[in-house]
Image: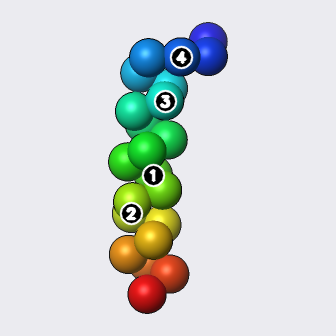
Amino acid sequence: KCGGIDKRTIEKFEKEAAELGK
């Protein structure tokens, strides 16, 4: 299942990962 929800979920993951990376 590639698309829609997956893309938004990945964006949220990247945002959280960026904050954790700080």
Estimate the spatial distance between the alpha carbons at disc 2 and disc 4, rounded to whole Å. Answer: 20 Å
- Amino acid under disc 1: Phe
Residue drawn at (61%, 16%) of the image: 2
Which one is earlier in the sequence, the residue at label 2 or at label 3?
3
Residue named by callout 2: 16
Instruction: Name the residue at the top extreme.
Output: 1
Mark 3 is on which residue type? Lys
How far apart are the alpha carbons under marks 2 and 3? 14 Å
Q: Which mark is residue 13?
A: 1
Residue type indicated by callout 4 = Gly
* Contact check, label 1 and label 3, Cβ < 8 Å: no
Badge 4 is on which residue?
3
Disc 1 from disc 3: Cα separation: 10 Å
Q: Which residue is located at x 48 percent, y 56 percent?
A: 14
Residue 3 pos. (x, y %): 53, 16
Q: In the image, 1: left or right of 16?
A: right
- Element type at mark 2: helix
Question: Residue beneath label 3, please?
Answer: 7
